[in-house]
């Protein structure tokens, strides 16, 4: 089945370390997103990309950067991790065609910054 | 930018009763309003969506209503079942399909 895959699924790191979360998809979608989930705060958009040459900031982009290496790959980097970046991170994709709008989420990457 | 507020944050109902979750949005340009369900430990999944050219949409026990004048939309679940227990998120976006989510409602259906 076509899917959205995130790696790593769990990561514990220390303050100041550089972290990369990777996302790949086999859905053939052109749009990819990174969201962060915190208890009581819902899903907040970090960055999004509508094609390989398109990168856009979301609601909470400070402290994060992204790279769209190919249509199927979208990675999120924390250059110098801090404890308040401890969260569950979701990658998502969507299609620009007939079913525009529906997001398909990966299984999530739980990041803990000590 | 868009801001979406969702209420209540938690909701407990008896099995068989109805549940209603409400959201308000701020950007009058928003025209797409989906609802996602996230079961414990799982990824969010779309359950129903509505676009601004309609006021109501139903899918079996689930319905969504939209009032563009008041900038609010609601999720209605009838005849609730234990498997409806989950966290529900509303969201809104304009034609860019940059979805902004509400803070979520944890629904508990008591057997």
Image (cartoon, coloured by chain):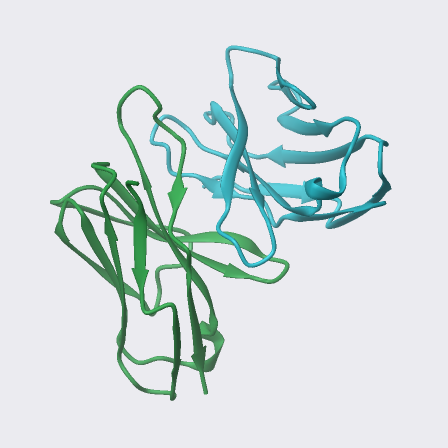
Chain colours: A green, B cyan
Residue that appears at 32% across and 87% down? A16
Q: Relative to A1, is B23 on the left or the right?
A: right
Q: Relative to A79, is A109 on the left or the right?
A: right
Q: In this view, does A46 lie above or below B83?
A: below
Residue that appears at 24% across and 36% down? A29
Q: In this view, does A68 lie above or below A31?
A: below
Which one is nearer the viewer's eye here, B52 or A74? A74
The N terminus of chain A: image quadrant: top left
Q: In this view, does B108 lie above or below A99?
A: below
Residue that appears at 32% across and 59% down? A6
Which x, y percent locates residue A69?
12, 55
Which x, y percent locates residue A63?
33, 70
Which x, y percent locates residue A92?
35, 47
Rendered image quadrant of residue A103: top left
Which x, y percent locates residue A79?
26, 76
Q: How many marks?
A: 0
Residue that appears at 71% across and 46% down? B85
Rendered image quadrant of residue A94: top left
Which one is nearer the viewer's eye here, A2 or B68? A2
Q: Relative to A19, is B46 on the left or the right?
A: right
Q: Residue furthest front?
A: A1
């Amino acid at each position: 089945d076509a899917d959205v895959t995130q790696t790593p699924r769990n990561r514990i790191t220390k303050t100041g370390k550089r972290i990369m979360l990777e996302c790949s998809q086999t859905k053939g979608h052109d749009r990819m997103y990174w969201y962060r989930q915190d208890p009581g705060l819902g899903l907040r958009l970090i960055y999004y990309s509508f094609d390989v040459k398109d990168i856009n900031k979301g609601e909470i982009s400070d402290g994060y950067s992204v790279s769209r290496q190919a249509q199927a790959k979208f990675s999120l980097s924390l250059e110098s991790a801090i404890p308040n970046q401890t969260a569950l991170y979701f990658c998502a994709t969507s299609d620009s065609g007939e079913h525009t709008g529906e997001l398909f989420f990966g299984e999530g990457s739980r990041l803990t910054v000590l | 930018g868009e801001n979406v507020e969702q209420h209540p944050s938690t909701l407990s109902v008896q099995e068989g009763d109805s549940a209603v979750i409400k959201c308000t949005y701020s950007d009058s340009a928003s025209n797409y309003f989906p609802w996602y369900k996230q079961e414990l430990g799982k990824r969010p999944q779309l359950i129903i969506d509505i676009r601004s050219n309609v006021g109501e949409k139903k899918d079996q026990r689930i319905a969504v209503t939209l009032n563009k004048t008041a900038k609010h939309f609601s999720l209605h679940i009838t005849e609730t079942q234990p498997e409806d227990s989950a966290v529900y998120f509303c969201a809104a976006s304009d034609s860019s399909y940059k979805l902004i989510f509400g803070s979520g409602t944890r629904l508990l259906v008591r057997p």
